[in-house]
């Protein structure tokens, strides 16, 4: 009853126009319960009105962005991740493919071994062909060594003067063999001392000296004489000594100190021995391909050969050879007898079966165009190893790689280390060879003064 009376009063107050005295009369009839009820009603209306206003404002505002799913921190790699469904995996693959290369490269990754899939196609095809023929490689030892040389193979594919692919050049090395991609030899020695930055900048000539580890005095004399010259005109020259491990282990500490002082020694971990000279020869080629791409020519000399580098540099500028420039030996026969003064050079038919050696360069000194080295080294992988380095490298490998041999010009190439050459006669030769392995430091200094006086046109 009271509720209906209150509603009628409110209706009349809010919706009808009545005299104020009439309204007050109604209020007096409601008695003492009216005031509390009016207060309660007013409070209820205020609460409802506030709620309706907030709802309207919320409805008019733009919708908030969707709340992303909570991202979890990367878990340790030991924790196995849940497999993706096929649809999720496909979507993730599409997102990765759509990302630019710069973004993909910034994704965290750990250093990995070189992958065959990342190699140039020429190298990948080459390795596939070699692997197909590796059934003749017991235990896969040679193939494993070859795979460890991926940086070298990349350079073999790109730095050769021959425009053919790596596989085509390798096939040419094998000649008429039925399976040309069968590995025959892969050299794999570690560096004891290395100077990878020795050839920084452009070089006309790198002179690689084959030196026995124990020959400290010879290396010191070379550094004080012809090996001290770094420029001929505007052309830069560089000297480096190649060593194996000394027969006397006590010498290694001296070699370590020598290397720290002069920074011109490359030493590998094979033993010094005359039957290991082919190892040293190939190590020169491998090192130059890897670390001395800037050199135009290589001169290989023994440490008892005096070299007029001024004369040699001038010759390379004006009459550059296409292949080897050397004392070209033809028709030589293998030494079969194991007695006499040449017994240590005796070769049995299992080592070298042919009755004659191919044409080759005598090893005391020669020059070769550097762009020929990749093909010579490539052919060493598919040729039978032979321990006499002159015949093996400049004969067998040169023939397989079809690198020409040009003989020294008459009166121009080499002669003995005669004291009479300490004069203007020095201009007639490039390499002065020690007879019977003698090494006379006094003669070398006299010869060097003649080089400076006449070849460089200087007066000391």
Image (cartoon, rainbow, N blue to C red):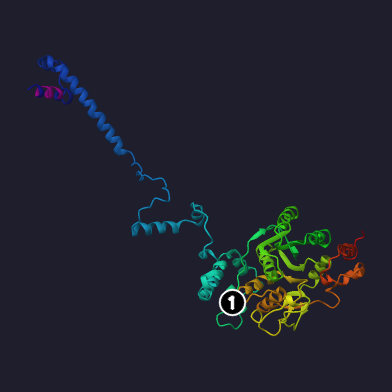
The dominant secondary structure in magenta is helix
Q: Is residue 441 left or right of residue 135?
A: right
Give the position of the C terminus as an image quadrant: bottom right
View extreme (bottom): residue: 355
Question: Residue at 91% across / 70% down in the picture?
Answer: 425
In the picture shown, does residue 445 fall above or below 410? above
Residue 143 position by quadrant: bottom right
Q: Position of residue 213 (x, y in %)?
A: 73, 62
Q: Position of residue 168 (x, y in %)?
A: 59, 76
Residue 290 position by quadrant: bottom right
Q: Position of residue 326 (x, y in %)?
A: 77, 75
Q: Is residue 6 magenta?
A: yes
Q: Is residue 148 magenta?
A: no
Q: Position of residue 299 (x, y in %)?
A: 76, 68
Residue 458 position by quadrant: bottom right
The magenta segment is 4-10
Say which residue label 1 marks: 168
Question: Residue at 34% across / 41% down in the picture?
Answer: 64
In the picture shown, does residue 107 fall above or below 141? above
Binning the other alpha carbons within 10 Å of mark 1 as few (below 14), some (14 to 19) or many (20 upward) gives few
Residue 1 visible in image: yes
Question: Residue at 43% across / 51% down in the picture?
Answer: 77
Give the position of the N terminus as an image quadrant: top left
418 or 172, nearer to the observer:
418
116 or 141, nearer to the observer:
141
View extreme (front): residue: 339
In the picture shown, does residue 83 fall above or below 348? above
Secondary structure of the residue carrying tag 1 is helix
Number of marks in the rendered image: 1
270 or 317, nearer to the observer:
270
Q: Is residue 404 left or right of residue 94?
A: right
Residue 124 visible in image: no
């Amino acid at each position: 009853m009271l509720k209906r009376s209150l509603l009628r009063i409110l209706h009349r107050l809010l919706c009808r126009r009545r005299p104020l005295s009439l309204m007050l009369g109604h209020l007096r009839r409601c008695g003492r319960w009216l005031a509390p009820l009016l207060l309660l009603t007013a409070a209820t209306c205020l609460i409802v009105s506030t709620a309706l206003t907030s709802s309207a404002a919320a409805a008019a505002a733009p919708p908030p962005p969707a709340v992303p799913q909570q991202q979890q921190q990367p878990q340790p790699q030991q924790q196995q991740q849940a497999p993706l469904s096929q649809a999720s995996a496909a979507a993730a693959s599409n997102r990765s493919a759509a990302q630019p290369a710069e973004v993909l490269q910034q994704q965290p990754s750990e250093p990995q071994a070189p992958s065959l899939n990342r190699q140039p196609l020429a190298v990948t095809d080459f390795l596939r062909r070699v692997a197909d023929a590796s059934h003749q490689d017991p235990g896969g030892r040679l193939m494993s060594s070859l795979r460890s040389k991926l940086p070298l193979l990349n350079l073999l594919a790109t730095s050769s003067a021959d425009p053919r692919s790596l596989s085509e050049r390798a096939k040419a090395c094998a000649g008429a063999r039925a399976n040309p991609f069968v590995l025959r030899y892969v050299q794999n020695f570690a560096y004891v001392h290395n100077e990878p930055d020795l050839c920084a900048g452009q070089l006309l000539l790198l002179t690689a000296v084959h030196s026995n580890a124990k020959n400290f005095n010879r290396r010191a004399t070379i550094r004080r004489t012809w090996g001290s010259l770094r420029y001929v005109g505007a052309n830069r020259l560089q000297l480096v000594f190649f060593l194996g491990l000394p027969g006397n282990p006590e010498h290694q500490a001296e070699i370590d100190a020598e290397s720290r002082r002069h920074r011109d020694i490359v030493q590998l971990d094979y033993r010094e021995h005359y039957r290991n000279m082919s190892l040293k020869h190939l190590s020169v080629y491998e090192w130059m391909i890897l670390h001395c791409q800037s050199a135009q020519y290589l001169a290989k000399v023994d440490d008892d050969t005096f070299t007029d580098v001024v004369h040699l540099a001038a010759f390379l500028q004006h009459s550059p050879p296409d292949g080897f420039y050397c004392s070209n030996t033809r028709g030589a026969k293998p030494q079969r007898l194991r007695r006499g003064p040449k017994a240590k050079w005796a070769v049995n038919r299992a080592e070298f079966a042919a009755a004659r050696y191919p044409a080759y360069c005598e090893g005391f000194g020669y020059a070769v165009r550097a762009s020929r080295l990749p093909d010579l080294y490539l052919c060493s992988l598919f040729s039978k190893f032979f321990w006499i380095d002159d015949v093996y490298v400049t004969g067998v490998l040169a023939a397989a790689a079809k690198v020409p041999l040009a003989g020294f010009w008459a009166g121009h190439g080499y002669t003995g280390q005669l004291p009479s050459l300490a004069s203007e006669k020095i201009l007639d030769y490039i390499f002065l060879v020690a007879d019977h392995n003698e090494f006379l430091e006094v003669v070398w200094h006299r010869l060097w003064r003649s080089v400076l006086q006449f070849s460089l046109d200087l007066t000391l």
